[in-house]
Image (cartoon, rainbow, N blue to C red):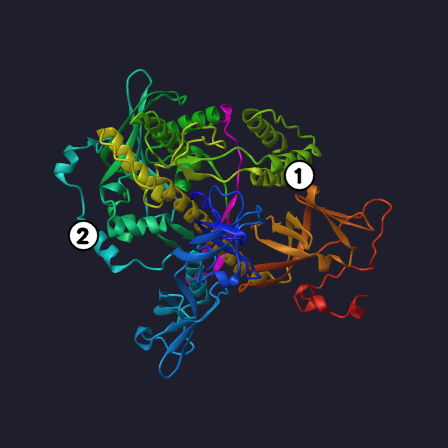
Amino acid sequence: MSKKVKKKSKSNVVGKDVFTGRLEVTRGGLGFVIVPGLERDIMIKPDKMLTALNGDEVRVEVGKSKDGGRRPEGAITEIVRRKQSEFSGRVEVHAHFAFLVPDSDKMPVDIYIPLHLLNGARTGDSAMAKVVEWTGKTKNPVGEIVSVLTNESMNEVAMQGLLAENGFPLSFPDDVLEDAARYPEGVDKKEIKKRRDMRDTLTVTIDPFDAKDFDDAISIKPLADGWYEVGVHIADVSHYIEPDSALDKEAYRRATSVYLPDRVSPMLPERLSNELCSLRPNEEKYTFSVGFTINKKGKVKDHWIAKTVIHSNRRFTYEEVQEVIEGAAGDYDKELLLLNEMAQSLRAERFKKGAINFSSQEVRFRLDDKAKPVEVIVKESKPAHQLVEEFMLLANRTIAEYVGGILFKDKQVPFPYRVHDIPDTDKLKMFTMFAGKFGVRFDLSGPETIAKSFNKMLETVTGKPEQHVLEQLGIRTMSKAVYTTENIGHYGLGFQHYCHFTSPIRRYPDVLVHRILQQCITQNIQPIKNLEAQCRHCSDQERRAMETERAANKYKQVEYMQDFVGEEFDAVISGVATFGFWAETVAHKCEGMVSSIDLSDIDNFEFKEGEYALEGRNTGLRFAMGDKVKVRVAAANLTKRQIDYVLAEMPELPAGKRRSVPVMRTKANNSSPKGRKTNTKKRK
């Protein structure tokens, strides 16, 4: 914050401060700029926004009130960085100009397209346009059509639209592709001499069956007296990406790969992500490695860190490794079983020292040749996944501890730590009160006792009806993990030092970690400028990627459920609000809303916030998080990415109570928006 300016007039404004932050725009059009470290968000009225859009990084000028004012109010003076520069919409071509009418209301005006930038688009085409100029002097931005989607499926339009909405480019600029193309295949003999040669050590990769960017590998070699050398080898992306190159700037801009059900929007061009850097089997590759001297019980005696060259002997899928763990014979089965034994020991020790054992289920989709989902598969964490996870966690922690112990000019080396703060106090108190209803008691005297209480709760409720609700609500009490140069530790993992080192193909912070790590090893430390700002950017991009992935998964779930309108499913209540509750099907984790309007046939329901429940005012009937219900699919709207359910069975009423309305509506079509306005005379 700048220094205060002395009062020069009798106005209420005594000076102005300038801040940089992220703009959030409400549905009503009012804006708020969120500035890190500032206690209150800065309010921006619609006429003070220039051309800024929701999510843009902006510079805002704030007038200071001599009476202390209320919420600070300001005006945007500059758009520092656009969140989104590409938009989907419909093309309208006129005699001398054209427009793209955006699909999303996040772009409030049409995009002006000069005829020479139409690139073949015609009236009525569904297309993507990139904004190339928007000075603020004119109402409409100037754009260029970058792709025409007329002949593509709804899925293509939807997936590209989601990426564009969240600011992820749909293609790489020519100079970035040229930068990536100039690197040669294979490894160089001179470069190999600078590295630790691991090509003769048994090395494998373990990844999802559809993965193409293999950025980590594990090696194992027996030593004397029951010790082994286990190497964690990570693609040496920093060998190829030179700081401040076109490739580096584009990787930083994206900061992460985005994984959608039918595609990957990569951080790096495929030339690097799927070819040069990918640790493919039977190819020699450059890696950055951590080697551990470790025994079967997961005890680590020593470690080394070095740039290496490896040769992967075998590419495994998680499913193949899991079969070996469960007793099947296969390639390198003895080595895989040994690695699994070590990993499970590391895992047990981690939880013993305070890591929280939250389990989460994710979904993936089996798609047909038109990207239509034909099956929803619930992913679970099995020992094969844990094998890789534990060694990656060990490597990440080891690197952070190493760099954290090095001083530069009597201070710690600036470094992008991955941190996770302790739970929010208010959320935690509300959660513990709710958990107490299930006989769960928490010791809130300190962070360590809270973590132990969480683990004890998770162990106690396993297999019980309340397991799902307590796990979900427990996760919601947790803070979000972020990147920062201020090392406060990682609460969820129970680590004092932690960073992201193991996925540089898909995460930019890992690239930064590799660069700083190499400086420390060679004792040539040159602190990266504006590292904290880069950390914030990477955290923001990670959040946007997660939002994009969730929206894409939701789209596929809605698309899948379109084939089941009118059918009934067992479900669990996953959320409660004043206007109804969300239910998630047990079979395929598809979440939809049961509206209070549809529940009005049973009773008038009141929202009990602290109890995560709706309660009937007359019947006493309750719908609470974690309750089992049977629902019928009423509608599946792809445009809104929304599933509507209605109750398929009348729940039992509390003893001595009766319905306030004679019969519950059960017809699926009565839950559609039109059905909710149906004349009550039809309800008999």
Q: What secondary structure is found at the residue carrying circle 1? A: loop
**Could you tell me residue 198's position as x and y percent?**
23, 31
Does the CB distance between marks 2 and 1 fall below 8 Å?
no
- Residue 428 figure quarter: top right
Q: Which residue is mark 2?
A: 182
Q: Residue furthest right?
A: 656
Question: Label 1 is placed on what type of residue?
Answer: Pro
- Residue 161 figure quarter: bottom left
Relative vertical location of residue 448 with respect to residue 583 in this rendering, above or below: above
The reply to whether the magenta stretch includes residue 355 is: yes
**Badge 1: few (under 14), some or many (20 or more) residues near its Cα, within 10 Å?**
few
The range drawn in magenta is 351-377
The reply to whether the magenta stretch includes residue 489 is: no
> In percent of the image, x 37 and y 49: which residue is there?
257
Q: CA distance from mark 2 to mark 1?
A: 58 Å
Q: Which residue is mark 1?
A: 465
